[in-house]
Amino acid sequence: MAKEAVTKNSKKQAIEWLKSANDDLDSISYLIQAEHLTNIVAFHSQQAIEKSFKAILAFENRRIPKKHDLFALHEIVKDDIKNIDSDLLFRINELYIESRYPGDIGLLPYGKPAISDAKEFYEYATDIFEKVCNILDIKIDDFK
C-alpha cells in the first residue's frame, strides 16, 4: 500500500496513539515490582507495542486495522521499523486474548509470566515505543 502524505492531522493522530502507549508504559512502571501482577504488566506491554505500531500508520495517514496481532501489524510497518526481536515479539503476541474474562488477560500459554519475563516485556515495549518516537521525530516530552 502506498504511503499517504503526512498531514498536521495525521501527526496529531500519531501523537494520540503514542500518548496511549506511553500511558501503558507509565502504568507498568507502577506495577513492575508486584509479582502477582506480572500478567497485567505483560498485557500493558503488548498494548504499548500495538499502539506504537498503529502510531506509524496514523502518522503516514494509512488505514489502521482493527486487529491486535503484533505480527500482522508489524508486517504492515516493517519497512518503517526494522531489526526487532521477532522471538520476543512472538512471546508478547501470545498475551493478547480476545476474551472478556479477566483471568485470561496477559497470560501466556503456560500461565502467568515470571517477574523476569514481565521486566523483559516492559523493556522491549519501551524500546519499540522509543524507536517509533524517533522514527516519527516526535519527542516524548511533547505530550507529557
Image (cartoon, rainbow, N blue to C red):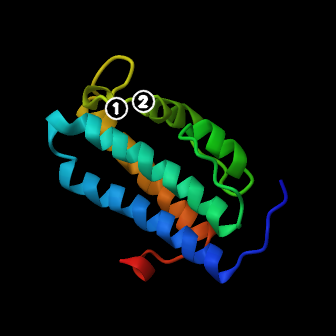
Q: Where's residue 47, x and y in %?
A: 43, 47
Q: Which quadrant does the C terminus fall into?
A: bottom left
Residue type (three-letter) at the residue carrying disc 2: Ile
Q: Where's residue 112, x and y in %?
A: 27, 26
Q: Residue at x 46, y 28 (%)?
A: 94
User: Which mark is drawn over residue 85?
Assistant: none
Would residue 6 appear left or right of 70 to someone viewing this image?
right
Callouts 2 and 1 close, C-beta under 8 Å: no
Q: Where's residue 138, x and y in %?
A: 54, 76
Would residue 121 appear left or right of 70 to someone viewing this image?
left
Q: Residue at x 49, y 50 (%)?
A: 49
**Residue 128 in view, yes or no:** no
Residue type (three-letter) at the residue carrying disc 1: Arg
- Callout 1: SS: loop
For label 1, the residue is 100
Q: Residues within 10 Å of mark 2 (few under 14, many from 20)?
A: some
Q: Residue at x 49, y 34 (%)?
A: 93
With respect to residue 104, does 58 lie above or below? below
Would residue 108 appear left or right of 36 to someone viewing this image?
right
Corner quadrant of residue 133: bottom right
Residue closest to the far front: 100
User: Which mark is drawn over residue 97?
Assistant: 2
Q: Residue at x 50, y 55 (%)?
A: 51
Q: Where's residue 129, x and y in %?
A: 48, 59
* Cα distance between the residues tagged 2 and 1: 9 Å
Corner quadrant of residue 85: top right
With respect to residue 72, does 22 lie above or below? below
With respect to residue 4, does 111 lie above or below? above
With respect to residue 56, does 110 lie above or below? above
- Callout 2: SS: loop
